[in-house]
Amino acid sequence: MNDNLGWVVAYPEILLLVMACVIALVDLFVKSPLRGATHVLTLLTLAGLALLTGVYASSGQVAVGFGGMVISDPMGNWLKCFASLALMVTLVYGRAYAGSRDMLRGGELFSLSLYALLGMFIMISGHNLLVIYLGLELLTLSSYALVALRRDDEQATEAAMKYFVLGALASGFLLYGMSLIYGATGTLDLAEVVRAIAGGEQTLAGSPRVLMLGLVFLVAGLAFKLGVVPFHMWVPDVYHGAPTAITLMIGGAPKLAAFAIVIRLLVQGLLPMVVDWQQMLAVLAVMSLLIGNLAAIAQTSLKRMLAFSTIAQMGFMLLGLLAGVSGGQGGNMANAYGSSMFYMVSYVLTTLGTFGVIMLLSRKGFESDNISDLAGLNQRSPLYAGVMAVCMFSLAGVPPLVGFYAKLSVLQALLASPQPFYIALAVFAVLMSLIGAFYYLRLVKVMYFDAPTQTAPIEAGADVRAVLSLNGALVLGLGILPGGLMALCAQAIAALIV
């Protein structure tokens, strides 16, 4: 590990901050209603960031800077790369949608999305409790503004207010937990935190009870950011009330950053307390799988159904973290945590395609946010119906799609443990997946067997059609040949836990 690189470690964040400011200034001189120049400059920035972080990740080097507060490692750089690509795809899908709803009048969509990405980058790179919290606040403040971007829409304004109030509560939980951990260990640095806890009462600056209370608040704050039960109350309302393009921004790339801070805080910082947070994650995972899948069945709103689906999917991802706990050291642990990272990446990829189709079906004055709005989609556009069907089958875990292999890798990691508890969790997860398959397959049935309720033509630019087709192809291709991405995730985690 090299700790003398200084500014080199933060090059992606510096580049992103500079370009976000430049794009905000350039937009002042753009007169096009669709902000063509701003859009292109933003996409070029995101492509450059993805390339830069991908090169950093491929090198396999681990470096820290700014007194150990920032870390650059393969896991973090790959997550930054994927987050940049996810935001890029989101803006390609969402530009026409946002333009038809007067959300591009000042270019705030592009500037705020870049600042939100900067918050994600800082969260992913943070190796200090305070740095991680600052990154989280930058992301959430940008997200509140993005949800309320349609100032004349009551539903979006209501969603933004709910998100703000509940987000402030969760931030308070997280900050209070961090302050208690600081009080118990006497440091904000994650490397020093883990040393202080591993040394027992002799190295702790405060009471072990204070440390335990801090862990409880910390896990509660993380659970809110992941949107798992019982901290899920904001997810359906925000998904449903926010404009669809913003829903994708909230439900896509930020999930990668949330996964990163769970790994940073729990695995890198609080691993000696693994028995304690393992039990908390197990309860969160079981409740999320149960409530998320059962509640999704009862939904008629497409976006609310996908919101409860997200809750269940995050519960499944937490099972991979539990498997990492039971996997011991070395390769088994890397494979288990790598399966969770693979699951999160595959989920984001599938979510992009799903909301991309929903935005295509929406038009000015009409939101395609009910399941019935997909009726007869195959008759209107076999391509879009095919992409949506592939994404639904993937979320349901049907082979040979990427979602199947993601679920399989998590289940294999659970079954690798000799403890009956983990085997029972695997069986429960399979049962919940069978329940979840119902509402995913119901969407496919509506698209292919119901009579169309909409006759308006589906208009999409060549760039949107190309990206959507590539998105669907990746969901299928990574399911048939998942080895490369799975190995990448395992190697990235292995570099982190060595």
Image: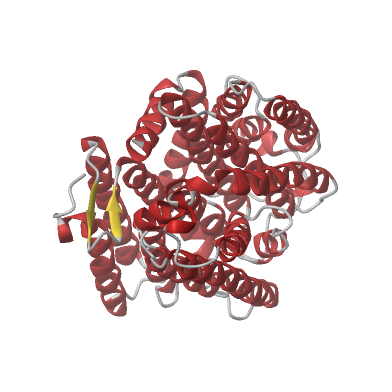
Q: Judge left or right: residue 364 versus residue 95.
A: right
Q: Position of residue 17 (x, y in %)?
A: 28, 68
Q: Judge left or right: residue 81 versus residue 364.
A: left
Q: Position of residue 259 (x, y in %)?
A: 50, 48
Quadrant of the image containing the C terminus? top left
Render colour scheme: secondary structure
Give the camera-side residue of 105 and 451.
105
Residue at screen point 56% across, 72% down: 176
Give the camera-side residue of 38 and 70.
70
Q: Where is 458 relative to 32, above or below?
A: above
Q: Position of residue 242 (x, y in %)?
A: 62, 66
Which residue is at the far right?
298
Q: Judge left or right: residue 459 versus residue 136.
A: right
Which residue is at the far front?
202
Give the camera-side residue of 364 and 492.
492
Quadrant of the image containing the N terminus? top left
Quarter of the image for residue 403 reads top right
Q: How many marks?
A: 0
Residue at screen point 25% across, 36% down: 58
Give the camera-side residue of 209 and 250.
209
Which residue is at the far left?
4
Residue at screen point 40% across, 64% down: 119
Q: Where is 357 relative to 399, above or below?
A: below
Q: Where is 166 relative to 193, above or below?
A: below
Q: Position of residue 238 (x, y in %)?
A: 66, 64
